[in-house]
Amino acid sequence: MTTRTRPEARRDVAIVAFAQTRHVRDSAALSEVEMLMPVLHEVLDQVGLTAGEIGFTCSGSCDYLAGRAFSFTMALDGVGAWPPISESHVETDGAWALYEAWVKLLTGEADTALVYSYGKSSPGRLRDVLTRQLDPYYLAPLWPDSVALAALQAQALIDAGDTDEAALAAVAGRNRTAAGANPYAQEAGDRPQGEYVVRPLRRGDCPPVGDGAAAVVLAAGDTARRLCERPAWIRGMDHRIEAHALGVRDLTDSPSTRLAAERAGAFDAPVDTAELHAPFTSQEVVLRKALGLGDDVAVNPSGGPLAANPVMAAGLIRLGEAAARIHRGASRRALAHATSGPCLQQNLVAVLEGEDR
């Protein structure tokens, strides 16, 4: 049995609330629960609900970051599991937790859902931790870190004539300048690119390492309209994956992003906003090409992951930021993208729309 990404007859589901932490380089004074609880309270307060009134709860996180197995069970202390709740967890970015919750609401098994994710990258060396995403037989034993792999992708783009170092610097400057209006950003304001981290990527081409959390509330149909003045309706969502072996991929393109966008309906009508989960400047070049985004689209008006990149929450934040622009009337039709794995290996695309009431 297959589930169609955009079934002909379905319930309308919307993002009705979004909250996030003020992202910081090191939150050593706080546990994951202490970091998460204010965000959960804020997002529920926005819609006037309690945890006990939520129909389904889903979270995204990573045990490798926490350094212990089943670490997400501790985070449930921040939600409150009594009376018993319907709960699930994904071992990846919270954007995929949102996808699971969306499907749950589409089936009619719940009318509301709480989705949250969090990540503390500060306790360890993130570049080493992320090598565990690689093929365990050929690549992982070599310990190529996330920045080195992104540099390979950037060099492939330069060799193909798709970009150059000056263009990458312009991407960095635009994102961090936009982050100046984002009170939650970790790094904001245009700044020098700095020294090379791994050629051709300079420090400004790379995301900051930091800690943070985010949460959204989903609701279906009339419940969404009751809870939010201008819901961000999810018109379509899909996720796809590239081949695991980097050597068999064209790193200058992202066919999985293009296919996910097509299945989500992104090409059915123009979008005015795109929140792209592009942790490296070179990855924004790849995503813009795959998604066919022109200069008329506001890309990462929040500053994107170049301004704040809490691992396991940055993708969910892209969906939340896109939804928040619809909530306040700054966008009519927005695209949100999330990724996981090296060099844009796994990609999720959602299309969000507002409506006039």
Image (cartoon, rainbow, N blue to C red):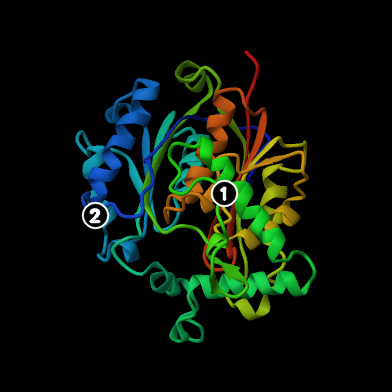
Kind of residue indicated by mark 1: Asp
Label 1 crowd (10 A; few <14 / some 14-19 / many >=20): some
Pair 1/2: label in front: 1
Q: Residue at x 65, y 32 (%)?
A: 9
Kind of residue indicated by mark 2: Ala
Q: Which residue in the rendered view is the most extreme toward the top?
A: 357
| Residue 76 image-quadrant placement | top left
- The residue to which callout 2 is attached is 28
| Residue 68 image-quadrant placement | bottom left
Is 314 displayed left or right of 261 in the figure?
left
Residue 238 position, x and y percent, is 61, 49
Q: Quadrant of the C terminus?
A: top right
Is 8 displayed left or right of 316 in the figure?
right
Q: Decide which of 296, 270 is in the foreground and name it.
A: 296
Q: Residue at x 35, y 20 (%)?
A: 48
Q: Decide which of 300, 175 is in the foreground and name it.
A: 175
- The residue to which callout 1 is attached is 190
Label 2 crowd (10 A; few <14 / some 14-19 / many >=20): few
Q: Decide which of 181, 29 is in the foreground and name it.
A: 181
| Residue 157 image-quadrant placement | bottom right
Q: Residue at x 54, y 69 (%)?
A: 195
> What separation in Å lies between label 1 and label 2 (alpha carbons)?
28 Å
Is 47 displayed left or right of 278 in the figure?
left
Can you see residue 55? yes
Q: Residue at x 59, y 47 (%)?
A: 175
Residue 40 position, x and y percent, is 32, 35
Q: Secondary structure at mark 2?
A: loop
Residue 111 position, x and y percent, is 44, 28
Q: Secondary structure at mark 1?
A: loop
Residue 202 position, x and y percent, is 57, 67
